[in-house]
Image (cartoon, rainbow, N blue to C red):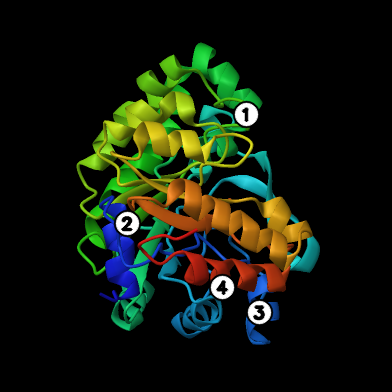
Amino acid sequence: MSMTSRERVLAALRREQPDRVPYCELGVDQALAKRLTGWQGITTQRANLEANPYTLEEALAVADRLDLDNLVYVLRGPVYVDKVEGQDGRLFYGEGQLRTWQDLDRLELPDPTDDALYEDLATFAAGKGDRALWLVTRMGIFPTTLGMGYEAFSVALFEDRRLVETILDRYVDWSCEVANRVCAMDIDAYVTTDDMAFKTAPFFSPQVFRDLVMPRYRRLREHVTAPWIIHSDGNLRPFVDDLLSLGIAGLHPNEKGAMDIQDMKRDYGDRLCLLGNLDLNILGMGTPEDVEEEVRMLIREVGPGGGYIVTSGNSLAAYVVPENALALSRAVHQYGAYPLTV
């Protein structure tokens, strides 16, 4: 029986087998969206990397072009770092600005009790149609490490742990109140994007993770009532069992070269929806035929039994070849129908 996109995504997040493997993305770069849609009104200049990049009309146009099963709305607290402008007006994170106690005066977050903060999200919820709406935010460990800078963060873990915890708790307190508000709205997934790992290993030891990060995740858990997807690039494998104790629904993106998504399916597929992980190198430098073959492999290896959502290995970046992005979508629709025959 044919499902709506929302039904399809929710079934996968429950580790059930929908009518087809869903295709979702955590984000689509504005420069790529402009090339895909021909919509010149989409701006590629953003003053705030934490701002939602699209109006509802633009988001629907991008989702229609890629035949996505989800829409994304971004609501994240500001990160206190220097921002460096790159190609096409895109911004990148630079040096951290929260190195000392005196720097804490800079750390101001939007009032999470202000109804105006959620007006655009309400517009997305009312206009999402049959698609699943993902609220994308952060728990707080990533803006803490970025805001302090990795060197200062690492030194402070041993010399001034209270500074680290103070910065982190300001973000977590904000995230808890935001979770209360957004989960009462018509969202279908709550996604936290806190990078915690390099390709080879996490940024910090499992002990630091359990002492510093997990208590904050558990506090946030009390406020998250929508299906929770956790995103982190890199090798998150040492933290997976801890994250599972939170009752999360999904893990994204199981980055290729850092985590083996087939092994993750074998070891955790009965407890976790896996999202990912089409190699961005293929999307950026390969051919549509390369993309199709990679999608077929992922569906064949990770799709059986459900509990799988195809996504790129992070998000669709500006350097992705538009024909490859379209090939990704086509291949999911061609090969993802259950019962699988790839």
Circle 3 residue: 36
| Helix, strand or loop at mark 1 | helix
Whether tag 4 and tag 2 are in contact, CB under 8 A, the answer is no
Image quadrant where residue 71 sits: bottom left
| Distance from the alpha carbon under mark 1 to that under mark 2 | 36 Å
Mark 4 Cα shell of 10 Å, populated few (<14), some (14-19), many (≥20): some
Image quadrant where residue 56 sits: bottom left
Between disc 4 and disc 1, the foreground one is: 4
| Helix, strand or loop at mark 2 | helix
Between disc 4 and disc 2, the foreground one is: 4
Q: Amino acid at mark 4?
A: Arg
Q: Amino acid at mark 2?
A: Ala
Whether tag 4 and tag 3 are in contact, CB under 8 A, the answer is no
- Residue 115 visible in the shown view: no
Q: Nearer the viewer, residue 49 or 254?
A: 254
Looking at the image, is mark 1 or mark 2 earlier in the sequence?
2
Circle 4 residue: 330
Looking at the image, is mark 1 or mark 3 earlier in the sequence?
3
Q: Amino acid at mark 1?
A: Tyr
Image quadrant where residue 103 sits: top right
| Distance from the alpha carbon under mark 1 to that under mark 3 | 36 Å
| Helix, strand or loop at mark 4 | helix
The residue at the far top in this view is 158
| Distance from the alpha carbon under mark 4 to that under mark 1 | 40 Å
Q: Which mark is residue 12?
A: 2
Percent across and percent down for residue 196 are 52, 34
Q: Looking at the picture, does residue 160 appear above or below residue 132?
A: above
| Distance from the alpha carbon under mark 4 to that under mark 3 | 14 Å
